[in-house]
Image: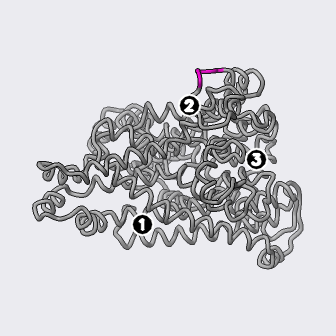
Amino acid sequence: MTTKNRRSEYLVAAVLVAPFVLIFGWMFIYPTLQMLQLSFTKSPLIGAGTWVGFDNYIKMFNDKQFWTAIWNTSYFVLLTVVPGTAAAMIIALMVSRLNGWVQSIILAAFFLPYILPVTVVYLIWDWMLNLQFGIAQFIIEPFAGKRVNVWRTLPWFMPMAALLTIWWTNGFSILLFLAGLRNIPRELYEAAALDGATRWQVFRSITWPLIWPVTVLCLTIQLILQLKIFDQVYLFAQGGRTQATMVLVQLIYEQAFQKNAGGYAATIAVALFVIVVGFSLLQFQLLRTRGGNK
Amino acid sequence: MTDIVSTAPIQIAGSRRRYFDPGYWILNLLTVAFAAIWFFPVYWALATSFKTDDEAVRAGVNLLPESIHLDGYAFVIQNSNLPIWYVNSIITSVAVTVLAVVMAACAGYAISQLKFPGRKLLWYLILGSFMVPVSALIVNHFIIIADVKLLNTHAGIVLPMLISPVTVIVYKNFFDSMPREYREAALIDGANEFQLLFRMFIPMNWGVTTALAIITFIGAWNSFLWPFLVAQNERMMTVTVGITAVQDTFGVAYARVLSGAVLASLPVALAYLIFQRKVTQAITLSAGIKG
């Protein structure tokens, strides 16, 4: 290739990547670096600040509210990730036994909540759980002995938020499990049937080991997703004891937009950043050791 | 969606079903019952939206509305900013979809097919950005958008939502698997790179393009945190953010509130029901599973 050709190829490439690189730099690289810099300053949300070194970080580690947010976020992750993935696997196994249009309809029933906006999910469940008129109170009452104002009762808050998050986001994992189940060679099942294996034996020695990689994928994707929890918790906690149910992203929001502490908010954002990137690297490592797809 | 799951367990059951197998039927019944329970909240919201406000709070469980009342719908459309929010949502979601997909296709093509300095670096940056939580960047996005005076504008809502590393990754992988000969033949015929991309690579990957476009649209329509921060003026809100404001003004008027919720989810629900297969494909692709 001549130099002239190569130069024109560079030019074409530059034109093609320019819009993406511009946005990527402006909306991704630059804010990431600015966040780091901001975390070392005491500054309002908008306007100049003063350099304070590691003060914000020291403040953060001594901030009870920060540790509450860490605890609540971890609790939420604990309540959603493994139970959600287990539920998705069971649903996928159930759906995969069906055929044709019945399967399409049943799958759509399980998947549809996933494409709803979070505020719609909030309005639906706010209505379902309404203290006076909520239909779900008919189920809660026999268990608790009385109607429960779920979003104003601390022990109920996170488990219920987790439950409806599973309800809302599980469609994603269900689809991954279904794709994984489809990839299991059908001959294995035929052989097992010839040997007269029971349903449980088939699951235990064929389905479970072959679906394990998808399980790991679902678990890690869910883990990273749920660490960033904000929307549901914010919406349901409105007007309630927001300090007690605070999660990490919500703390960033509160410090930046309600307390006008841009610098300190950036510090908590860095903490979230480090936690999520840490878990992502772990995921990357896990996927690589299983000879994954990247 | 039969092509997703033509799994084998049916076969095992089939070989045994020479005799009546109660386990098979019990499991199927359980599946249907569980699906009905899972779907119930969505149904209940729909049913409530067709009731009158009095009927919605009537004692007892009234699973079916007495008749289809559209009062709630008429009320939200006439007495809230919902029509304006709808326009805002359509403008921003369509803009995000078109811009993000076209930018990603161009970048994916360049990275896949062309040689240029910084290509490797760009690719690793994109792969790395995959794991960065965008919600950690909200404070700085706000500062940047405020700096360029775009708070409370459509552009301000759209800009931070345009970062789409996953879309670039999917495109790059698909363009990588295009046969080299096509490109070489077209180049000999005198086509330039832009014609190659828009007349050949994108049309030949039209399936992926529509799948990515649909999932991007659904994501943009549904996004909450950023539009909630940047559009503080009620007339600039998107539908997804706005419908909670409806609840604040209407109070305990659940038929009206849920009518708003149904309207807000209509475009994404329809997009899913019409393009089920595309949505499925986009989701498995974005998780790194070849669909």
Task: Indicate the secondary structure of the residue bearing disc 2.
Answer: helix
Which residue in the structure is indicated by mark 1? Answer: A216
Q: Are marks 2 and 1 on the same chain?
A: no
Q: Give the CA separation, mark 3 to mark 2.
A: 23 Å
The three-letter amino acid code for the residue at tag 1 is Val
Q: Quadrant of the N terminus of chain B?
A: top left
Q: Determine whether A80 is above or below B210 in the image.
A: below
Q: Give the CA separation, mark 2 to mark 1.
A: 33 Å
Q: Nearer the viewer, mark 1 or mark 3?
A: 1
Task: Indicate the secondary structure of the residue bearing disc 3.
Answer: helix
Q: Are marks 2 and 1 in contact (CB under 8 Å)?
A: no
Q: Give the CA separation, mark 1 to mark 3.
A: 34 Å
Residue plotted at (13% across, 50% down):
B19
> Who is closer to the viewer here, B98 or A174?
A174
Which residue in the structure is indicated by mark 2? Answer: B267
> Who is closer to the viewer here, B118 or A277?
A277
Q: Determine whether B93 is above or below A165 in the image.
A: above
The three-letter amino acid code for the residue at tag 2 is Pro
In magenta, the rendered stretch is B66-70
- What label does residue A73 carry, if any? none
Which residue in the structure is indicated by mark 3? Answer: B229
- Chain assignment, label 2: B
- Chain assignment, label 3: B
The three-letter amino acid code for the residue at tag 3 is Leu
Q: Earlier in the sequence, mark 3 or mark 2?
A: 3
